Image (tube, helix red, strand yellow):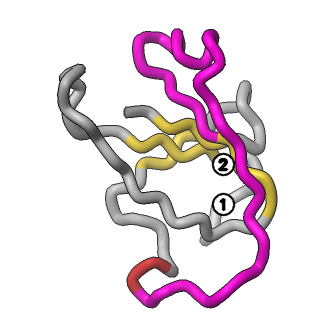
Amino acid sequence: MDDESDDDTFQYNGGSVAFDESQTIAMPLTEKGSNYFFSDTNDGIQCQNGLAFGNSVNHGLELLPNLNQPSPLLTLNRLDSMPNRRRLQL
């Protein structure tokens, strides 16, 4: 049974939290439409200060085979308070 819906929220977590260590998380944009990314690190203080971004995904070239499925490390959370948005936690 597929229980996906339009208001799913994906939370990426992991990696270093040290200030002097950079971290990059690759996120293939596989869904058409608007996507919003937020950081809830330190109880969301970044979002309160404007650290968020959005993008619009349109149809383009087909994805590479290794990018056409969600990451196995993906943790799915349903957050009713943030419909149609994706949170990025670093």
Q: Residue at x 37, y 51 (%)?
A: 25
User: Quarter-wise, where is residue 56 in the image?
Assistant: bottom right
Q: Residue at x 34, y 47 (%)?
A: 24
**What kind of residue is marked 1?**
Glu
Label 1 packing within 10 angstroms: few (<14), some (14-19), many (20+): few
Location of the C terminus by quadrant is top left
User: Quarter-wise, where is residue 15 in the image?
Assistant: top left
Q: Residue at x 29, y 41 (%)?
A: 23
Residue at the spot of label 1: 4
Residue at the spot of label 2: 8
Q: Nearer the viewer, residue 70 or 49?
A: 49
Q: Position of residue 33 (x, y in %)?
A: 80, 61
Q: Position of residue 75 (x, y in %)?
A: 42, 48
Let me know if residue 45 is in the magenta part.
yes
Q: Nearer the viewer, residue 44 or 53?
A: 53
Q: Position of residue 46 (x, y in %)?
A: 53, 16
Q: Nearer the viewer, residue 64 or 7?
A: 64
Q: Which residues are magenta?
A: 37-65
